[in-house]
Amino acid sequence: DRHRTAALADSAAHEKKLNLYIWSAYMPQEVLDDFTKQTGIAVHFDLYDSNESVLEKLQSGVADYDLVVPSDYMVRILIHLNLIQPLQRERLRGWENLDPRFLNKGFDPGNRFSFPYVWGTTGYGYSRERVKGSPDSWAPLFDPANKGQILMLDDMRECFSAALKSLGESINTRDAAILKRAAEVLKKQKPLVKTYNSSDFENILAAGDVTYAHGYNGQIAKVIAANPGKFGYVVPKEGATIWVDSVCVPTGARHADAIYAFLDYILDPKVNARIINAISYASGNGAALQFIKPEIVHDPAIYAPEEALTRCEFVEDIGDATELMDEYWTEIKAQ
Amino acid sequence: MSRPHGGFLRAHTWLIYAFLYAPIAILVLFSFNKATQTAVWQGFTLEWYGSLAHNELILSAVRNSLIVGVAATMLATIVGTLVALALGRYEFPGKGFTRNLLYLPIIIPEIVVGAALVTFFGVVGLRLSLVTVVIAHVVFSVSYVAIVVRARLSGFDRSLEEAALDLGARPLQTFWRVTLPLILPGIVSGALLVFTVSIDDYVITSFVAGVGATTLPLQIYSMLKVGVTPEVNAVSTLLLVLTIVLIVVAQRLQQPPPEGLRD
Amino acid sequence: MSAIPNPKSVIRNRVNPALPLVLPTWLVIGVFFLLPLTILFVISFAQRGTYGSLKPIDDFAQYVRSGKILANYARSLHPIYLQIFWRSVWMAVVTTVLCLALSYPVAYYIAVVAPPRRRNFLLGLAVVPFWTSFLIRTYAWMFLLRTEGLINRLLLGTGLISHPLELLYNNFAVLIGLLYGEIPFMILPLYASLEKLDLSLLEASADLGAPRASTFLRVTVPLTMPGIVAGIILVFVPSLGQFIVSDLLGGARTILAGNLIQNQFAVARNKPFGSAVAFELTAAVLALLFVYAAYTRKKGQDVLL
Amino acid sequence: MIAAMPPETSVAIRSLTKRFGDVAAVDAVSMDIRRGEFFSLLGPSGCGKTTLLRMIGGFELPTEGRIAIDGADVTHRPPYERPVNMVFQHYALFPHLTVEANVGFGLRYKHKGVDRARESGVVAEALSLVQLSGFEKRLPHQLSGGQRQRVALARALALKPSVLLLDEPLGALDQKLRKEVQVQLKHLQRELGITFVFVTHDQEEALTMSDRIAVMNRGRVEQMDEAARVFERPATEFVANFMGASNFFAARVREAAGGSLALALAAGGEVRLPLNGTRYKPDDAVRFVVRPEKLDLRLRDLSAHGVPSVAVTIEDRVYQGISTVWIVRDAADERFVVYEQNEKPFEEASRFAVGGRAFLCWNPSHAVVIKPEGQTA
Amino acid sequence: MIAAMPPETSVAIRSLTKRFGDVAAVDAVSMDIRRGEFFSLLGPSGCGKTTLLRMIGGFELPTEGRIAIDGADVTHRPPYERPVNMVFQHYALFPHLTVEANVGFGLRYKHKGVDRARESGVVAEALSLVQLSGFEKRLPHQLSGGQRQRVALARALALKPSVLLLDEPLGALDQKLRKEVQVQLKHLQRELGITFVFVTHDQEEALTMSDRIAVMNRGRVEQMDEAARVFERPATEFVANFMGASNFFAARVREAAGGSLALALAAGGEVRLPLNGTRYKPDDAVRFVVRPEKLDLRLRDLSAHGVPSVAVTIEDRVYQGISTVWIVRDAADERFVVYEQNEKPFEEASRFAVGGRAFLCWNPSHAVVIKPEGQTA
Ligand SMILES: Nc1ncnc2c1ncn2[C@@H]1O[C@H](COP(=O)(O)OP(=O)(O)OP(=O)(O)O)[C@@H](O)[C@H]1O
Ligand SMILES: Nc1ncnc2c1ncn2[C@@H]1O[C@H](COP(=O)(O)OP(=O)(O)OP(=O)(O)O)[C@@H](O)[C@H]1O
Ligand SMILES: [Mg+2]
Ligand SMILES: [Mg+2]
């Protein structure tokens, strides 16, 4: 069946058409319009709400997308499952614009399959009104004093990462003993947690239901912007998870020409800056930095400070340890 | 027959309706909310309706949802009604099997159905699109119709159909002119159920939707990452108003049947 | 006049007229549901490989002998999971019972008391709320229930309570959410079978001295049993698999069967285990239905499909 | 409490009216049904019998008027609070219950805490009464029409209420079974002293069973009287007609004395009726009726012997088993019907030929002067 | 095609059986119903009339046996392919359709492409036939019992089928309306030459309307014969009984000559019956029956005049309007019933007192010797 898809691909290769599968609010319409104006290539795009959607769609082999923007760990999986194809570097102009800090990472050594689009961190947001001083570690999220004031992401890996980091361990450890300790921490933490939520945690923070909200920088940045001076965002000093959403080309993507035309287009610093200014995420394109609005570049909730970054890790698949972790997680939730 | 308890029943009914509409009121309220988050009230505005007008994403999502909803409802209603008739009327090989076949889609968790379906489409090489979405929806909603219509059929006065046949109507004509009108309430209920599950299905759709097949629920969930904007409330509100208007109109158009022993 | 179905009527006896009626279903569900499901059923005996793919089985015989083939099912019987199942079932039962109790009077009012020409209208009103986004509705509920939510504000304002009630992020909230979501699935089937209720039978019962309650229990309920059962099935089963409600309103602090499966598929990416759990659940529910069907057949009624 | 209600009254109805839209199904009906009496409602299809019964039973709220049972005003009481039971015209058997369960249905309410044993005893009794022993375990849809009707009957009888409402309870039974059940009903009614309000469309049934009969027409009561009187002395043309006394004679008063009334028949000839003529003035137009079985066909004119005799032509002859029906016309072309019981010994089979002439004779005391159509008693 | 079917046969039934579980509702019934004849099925409740009719109509598949209509075997044809229409015992009116629509329902199938105008014409005609003009727009549940039945009747009549099956079509009508509809039906049947298969539980109705009658008992046919003969010459005790001829005399053959049969009554006394006695041997036990209306009560013993006379005691007297019923017992304590039409002129009101003695006389030619119970014709 894959072969048939490939055959189709050749025929469709020169079609002036592009199907994008991407997180919402990652691609401003006007940029796409301009691209279409310049190249005559019509861009259609659908949105997904989780990396797993990408995996499912590509695994089905009948999804017909030309570009996807999954997160780091998913990139590794997609590579492993041959669901994305190597980039034809020679057809790409502007590779040098990419920020070296996010190249050649574990999930895609040598970036044979992907390049960074935007990146961010998972720390926590807090209410400046209720918290005196400015917290800088994971401690408050595990502090009984904050009972009922804590929101944690409803996400196994992120919660374990928080716990592991607070224990000074790697978030990708496969060591059962360490995982057990982390689980203990989370078990102890549960009574303090008001709610686990990864869908609209920012609103819950904004609404004042909780004081501390474990979460992705993007959403929390929006809350901070909407309520000037009321909220803050922390990338704890013990370190946190960092994520990069990378551009990949699915195996059997059919509109080769369009794809590379588009990749060139978004690798262009000015275009990239336009995108970033519109969506206010941190860009994986270093050269674009100079064109990006300063308030974005200097917002710690968007561009995490350098020294914090050094202590951050990417989430990676931990193989069979996943099952163990999952069992712990279930226990924690079920207790 | 005198029915003094009608009062209590009416009161209870309206209470339940209040319960059903309480969150809807909030939903509508927030479509006029200045704030971008759905959690805090920051004053009145109409901008969301304005921005909705040129939010191609949401609009096309709505379009898709309606297409899927209507298509799935029609197909599922037909298929489900037919099988209900078969189950209610006839003895045939594989009757028990059919029964359980119909229970499965309801029993098996959506996510499993979704995963199974997408895998299957992959195997047979059926490109994901609105079509696959409709198929999926029909699959899991046939049962709703079947179950409701079947319930309606039990205790059906067969002598009425016999009378029709006796008067020369073929089975099909008998069905149209006698059976159908009499089981219509069941069919309507079934159809309403299907549309209700279809129009708001997220889990399964998220698996089987393909290029250009983003339905409203998918659109909304995808917005989670950046926070759902009140545009969604706005569009929901519009749809709500539309449907209610339609229902009221239909109600007006329906000529009052002669009052009977019932009321 | 009471219905006189004719068990041996000719309309039934002609050479199988049922086939054209069931064929579409067999096609739709058989092809697009049973086949896919078989795939997953097979998968449920496999093991999760790295990156959530399936672990290749090099020596099948060995795989069977070592009992690995049933590993997933074995694992799902771990007390922790059993506890989860139990809690889910309990939740579902409570939901279903409350749902039935709340919906029956409504359905009765619409189908029997309200003037016929208003029935469709009322029916419509009962379902349209559910044509809006589930997520948004749930957010609305959160807005109503949260500590600084509308309800608490009102209660505080009226001085009925001195400090806010914890309405959100607990089982109460989950129950509200489940109830809310399932009510139409109870009302509609009930309506369908109440609408054809022969009122002269209620008269007869009343005439024989049965007070309203008895008439209800001995005549109305038995005659509408098909609708009741349909409603129970349509409510109980889905609320068993629900997970988003308990995540958002319950604060994801407890985990139900639905979440468990969801997590296996989406987070742990352990399809084999997820499927195993799902199929176990399915088997359990089917078993329940069988028991019930057998029971009713014995009593010569037909109230199931 | 309803005013002016004789103590022995079981069911008192006062100006009761029921309208369906603009149809007045029951129109200002008043009656006192006596305790323990067998009271029949007779009338053409659609005249309001069922509706009246349903209001007594409490299944329809009257548009106007009041109903009292055993002295208590029950106009707004629900059925289960009325000491009455009803046999429904369309049976209303519970389709989900066996014959047994149907019949036993009401017992537990009637006598609280009745033990299973007694209950099944009562049920068996009621069923044997309607000759359905052996059908206990059947479901209604497995019964024939008549069997269903009998189950409905048994169900009501089992409760031995103080007032029993029966809506054509024997309609679907063959004459033989019907006669038997009639006897049993009558017996039961006497024995238990139950008040029966009986709707039937069968005059003979009404006559043989009832103490009193109310004949209804278009929602109103035309005549209410002892069974025999309604039959022998119809008050209005409608009643006369409905009771099958379709032989109307038009005449003018010739001479109105105290003890008798001399009339000149429109068709010619004169008759003397032995009744108080003082209410009439000479030349008044009057109509009187003679029942078919009370008319006799003769070959000779008997007026000489003071027997009213009208010359007629024989138009038709219909064999009816027990009797033969003769259709004849007089000079004024009025149509008359004569019943003649078939073949008593020593009477030659048929003295008259169709087309032949004969004389219509009757016993003057059998002539009933009636009010013109419409006017009610 | 069914063997040995006379050409003029409209409905041919051959050893037709229908079992419900172990109940044989219809048991090996065979009959030829002639084209254009008015054929009645008579029998007690539950004897299988409806079931037989439903098989002819095509609503029940026979367990055994065959049915042919107008020469074509239709045993396995669906109802809509049979040239028959049925008036259902329980009406089976379409609750969602107006009276009009109910009656008009079948027209479009009967004559393809019938225009609205003609259709409504037919409907109006059918409705006026059953006197329901003006009810066109009503829904069934807004009709009285009798009105519903009449709609059902009109619905079937509107199609003017070649065979019309009527299951107690007049059961819910009052006698007056019933008589009128009977006349119209009979008229219609003659005019259109429709074959009527008529189920009734009313002997008189059967007698007045039918050409032939089949009396059924427990699913079997006891006697099938001209209307009058079934009545006058019942073949079995069951038929006699069912036809209301409940006066049975037990006797022994004294002397069996060619022209007459001398019997010694069990109760004492001797009678001579004018019939061929050659079939009997002296001392045979025989039973004969005399219809109630053919018995006469006399003060004197008339045996001297060759009139059979049996001494009886008068037990009871029941007024029945048209006639009076006398219940009497003979020496052997056998019970007899005598109908006496009420008060012909010049007969003193009541010559007999309850408890008094009298003689039971009859015309020997009215005595019918019958087969013992069970044995069918
Ligand atoms: N579906 C059934 N299952 C079992 N027995 C049945 C069924 N239908 C009819 N019977 C039985 O068959 C017998 C004949 O029924 P049928 O309706 O033909 O009687 P009928 O002659 O029409 O009586 P009626 O004059 O009371 O209508 C009855 O004893 C009845 O109980
Ligand atoms: N729900 C209704 N709506 C309108 N008219 C009705 C309704 N119910 C009864 N009627 C009318 O009221 C009149 C009396 O009906 P009812 O049933 O009392 O007649 P009935 O005397 O019982 O006749 P039958 O002897 O045929 O049963 C009839 O003309 C009938 O059409
Ligand atoms: Mg009536
Ligand atoms: Mg019958």
Image (cartoon, coloured by chain):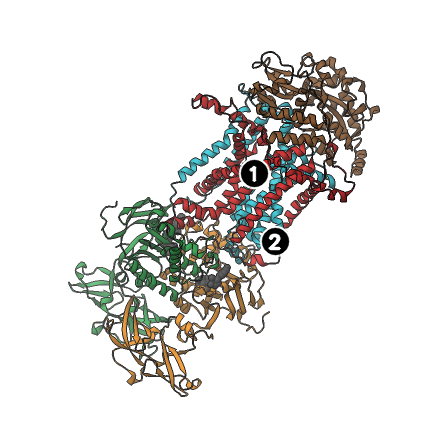
Chain colours: A brown, B cyan, C red, D green, E orange
| Residue positioned 22% across, 62% down in the render | D252
Instruction: Name the image quarter holding the N terminus of chain A.
Output: top right
- What residue did someone put label 2 on? C18
Image-based side of B255 in relation to E4, left or right: left
Tell me how far mark 1 sits from mark 2, CA to CA: 36 Å
The answer to which image quadrant residue D76 occupies is: top left
Q: Residues at badges 1 and 2 in contact (C-beta under 8 Å)?
A: no
Provide the chain ID for the residue under circle 1.
Answer: C
User: Which amino acid type corresponds to the residue marked 1 in the rendered image?
Assistant: Val
- Find numbered disc 2 in the image and state the secondary structure of the residue it sits on: helix
State the residue in front, A191 or C211.
A191
- Find numbered disc 1 in the image and state the secondary structure of the residue it sits on: helix
> Within 10 Å of the Cα at label 1, are there few (<14), some (14-19), or many (20+) other Cα atoms?
some
Which residue is situated farthest in the front direction here? Answer: A177
State the residue in front, A235 or C217.
A235
State the residue in front, D325 or A41.
A41
Chain-order first, disc 1 or disc 2: 2
- What residue did someone put label 1 on? C89
Residue E249's spot in the image, x, y percent? 36, 78
Q: Is mark 2 within 8 Å of ligand 1?
A: no
Image-based side of E74 in relation to C113, left or right: right
Any part of residue E125 in sight: no
State the residue in front, C305 or E6.
C305
Instruction: Name the image quarter holding the C terminus of chain A.
Output: top right
Q: Is residue C172 above or below residue E227?
A: above
User: Which amino acid type corresponds to the residue marked 2 in the rendered image?
Assistant: Ala
Q: Could you say which disc has been placed on residue A188 in the image?
A: none
Residue A190's spot in the image, x, y percent? 59, 25
> Within 10 Å of the Cα at label 2, are there few (<14), some (14-19), or many (20+) other Cα atoms?
many
Q: Is residue C76 above or below residue E127?
A: above
